[in-house]
Image: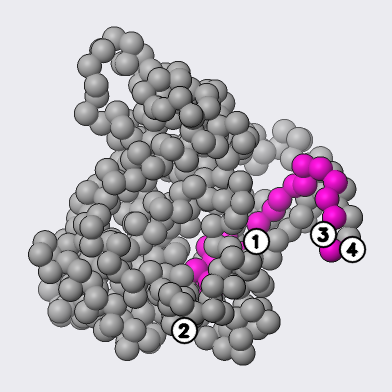
C-alpha cells in the first residue's frame, strides 16, 4: 500500500506509527477475513465461482477502516465511499483529451469533483477534531486509540510517541488519511487478487503454499503474528506476484535539485516517470524467463534475486519515499490468502479473460473469476 510521505519532516512520525500498530492490526485483519470466509461458506454448492477482484474490495476497505480509524469506523466508511467515487471521476478525467486550464472552469463536472473533494476533507477534519476533543474531555486511555489516526494525532500533539518522531500538522494528517484510504484499499485488494489468480493457474505452487500454511497454523488453525513469519513460500509467491503485476506500475518523482544520472543532467523540478512494470520484466536482470511465474527466484541465497531486489524490484518504491505501508499490505495479503487456502482449493474459471489494464492501478479489465472448491 503506497502511503507516501508528503514531506520528509513527518516521515519518522508515520513510520514509527506503523511499527507501533503493526502487531495490533493482525487480529482485526483476521476477524474481517473470517467474516468474508463465512459469507462464502453459506453457499450450498461444493464448487462455486467468485470474482475475487470485486469481492475483496469491501473486505479490504473494512480492514483499512477498522485499523486506521478504529473507534471512528462509521466516519471512515463514509470517507472511503466518497474516495471510491473520486477514483471513478479520476478515470473519466484521464479518458478525456487534455486541454490546458480546463480543470479550473466551473463546469457541472468540475463542480461535482470539487464537491466530492471538499466533502472528503470536511469529513476527515471532523473525524480528527472529534477524536481530539474526546481526548481533552477524557484523560483515560481509549481502548481503540492506538489506531493510525490516534498515533498521527499523537505526532501532531507531540505526545504519546517517542521524541524521535517529528511533529505533524493537521494538513499532514488529512493528506495522509486520504492517501491511506485511496491507495491502501485498491493496491492491497489488487495484490491479493493477482496472487490468487497465479496460485489458481499454478496448482503445484498452490499445494505447496497450502501445506506450508497448514504446518505454520497447526496449533491455532489460523495465521497469527508468529506464524506469518514462517510463511516463506507464501512470501516468495507474493514477491513474484508483485513483480509480474505491480499494483502501481508507474511512479512519478520530482527532482529536488540538479542531479546527474549517467551522462544526463536532470534539472531541479523535473518530473520523472519511472516504469516499474518495465523494470520488473527486464530480461537483463531477471533472465529469459522474466515473464514467467517462478517464485524460486526470490528464494534466499539466489544471487540473481538478490541483485534484482536491490536495484529493480520496486513494488513499494525505494529510498526516503518508499511505501511505509508495506508491512500492512503484506500482512493482510498473507492472512487473507492463508485463510482462503485453508478452506478452499481455487481453480481458474472458464469465464476468466486475462486482460490487465492501467487505470490508476494495474487491474483486471474483466475481473478475476475463480472457482472455489471446499476442502
Marks 4/2: CA distance?
Answer: 35 Å
Q: Nearer the viewer, mark 1 or mark 2?
A: 2
Q: Which residues are magenta?
A: 242-263
Image quadrant of residue 30? bottom left
- Which callout, 3 or 2, points at the residue further toward the start of the chain? 3
Residue at 61% x, 51% y is 319
What secondary structure is marked by label 2?
A: loop
Q: What is the x, y in percent for residue 207?
A: 26, 84
Quarter of the image for the C terminus: give it. Answer: bottom left
In the visual, does 152 lie left or right of 375?
Answer: right
What secondary structure is marked by label 3?
A: strand
Q: Which mark is residue 250?
A: 1
Q: What is the x, y in percent for residue 242?
A: 49, 68
Q: Nearer the viewer, mark 4 or mark 2?
A: 4
Q: Which residue is mark 2?
A: 294
Q: Which residue is mark 3?
A: 261
What secondary structure is marked by label 1?
A: strand
Q: Nearer the viewer, mark 3 or mark 2?
A: 3
In the visual, does 254 lie left or right of 41?
Answer: right
- Which callout, 4 or 2, points at the residue further toward the start of the chain? 4
Amino acid at each position: 500500500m503506497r502511503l507516501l510521505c508528503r514531506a520528509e519532516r513527518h516521515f519518522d512520525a508515520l513510520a514509527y506509527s506503523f511499527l507501533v500498530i503493526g502487531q495490533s492490526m493482525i487480529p482485526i485483519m483476521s476477524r474481517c477475513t473470517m467474516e468474508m470466509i463465512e459469507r462464502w461458506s453459506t453457499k450450498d454448492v461444493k464448487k462455486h465461482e467468485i470474482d475475487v477482484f470485486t469481492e475483496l474490495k469491501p473486505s479490504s476497505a473494512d480492514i483499512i477502516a477498522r485499523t486506521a480509524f478504529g473507534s471512528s469506523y462509521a466516519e471512515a466508511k463514509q470517507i472511503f465511499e466518497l474516495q471510491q467515487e473520486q477514483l471513478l471521476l479520476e478515470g473519466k478525467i484521464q479518458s478525456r483529451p487534455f486541454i490546458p486550464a480546463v480543470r479550473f472552469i466551473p463546469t457541472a463536472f468540475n463542480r461535482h469533483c470539487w464537491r466530492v473533494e471538499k466533502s472528503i476533507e470536511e469529513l476527515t477534519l471532523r473525524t480528527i477534531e472529534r477524536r481530539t476533543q474526546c481526548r481533552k474531555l477524557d484523560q483515560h486511555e481509549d481502548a481503540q486509540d492506538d489506531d493510525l489516526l490516534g498515533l498521527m494525532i499523537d505526532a501532531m500533539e507531540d505526545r504519546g510517541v517517542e521524541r524521535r518522531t517529528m511533529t505533524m500538522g493537521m494538513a499532514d494528517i488529512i493528506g495522509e488519511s486520504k492517501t491511506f484510504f485511496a491507495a491502501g484499499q485498491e493496491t492491497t485488494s489488487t495484490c491479493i487478487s493477482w496472487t490468487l489468480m497465479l496460485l489458481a493457474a499454478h496448482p503445484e505452487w498452490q499445494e505447496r503454499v497450502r501445506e506450508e500454511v497448514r504446518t505454520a497454523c497447526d496449533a491455532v488453525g489460523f495465521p497469527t503474528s508468529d506464524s506469518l513469519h514462517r510463511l516463506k513460500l507464501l512470501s516468495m509467491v507474493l514477491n513474484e506476484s508483485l513483480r509480474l503485476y505491480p499494483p502501481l506500475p508507474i511512479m512519478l518523482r520530482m527532482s529536488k535539485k540538479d542531479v546527474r544520472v549517467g551522462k544526463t543532467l536532470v534539472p531541479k523540478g523535473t518530473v520523472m516517470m519511472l516504469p516499474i512494470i518495465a523494470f520488473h520484466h527486464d530480461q537483463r536482470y531477471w533472465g529469459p524467463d522474466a515473464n514467467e511465474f517462478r517464485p524460486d527466484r526470490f528464494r534466499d541465497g539466489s544471487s540473481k534475486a538478490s541483485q534484482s531486489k536491490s536495484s529493480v524490484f520496486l513494488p513499494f518504491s525505494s529510498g526516503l519515499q518508499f511505501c511505509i505501508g508495506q508491512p500492512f499490505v503484506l500482512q493482510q495479503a498473507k492472512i487473507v490468502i492463508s485463510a482462503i487456502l485453508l478452506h478452499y482449493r481455487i481453480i481458474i474459471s472458464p469465464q476468466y479473460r486475462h486482460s490487465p489494464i492501467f487505470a490508476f492501478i494495474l487491474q483486471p479489465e474483466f475481473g478475476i473469476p475463480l472457482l472455489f472448491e471446499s476442502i
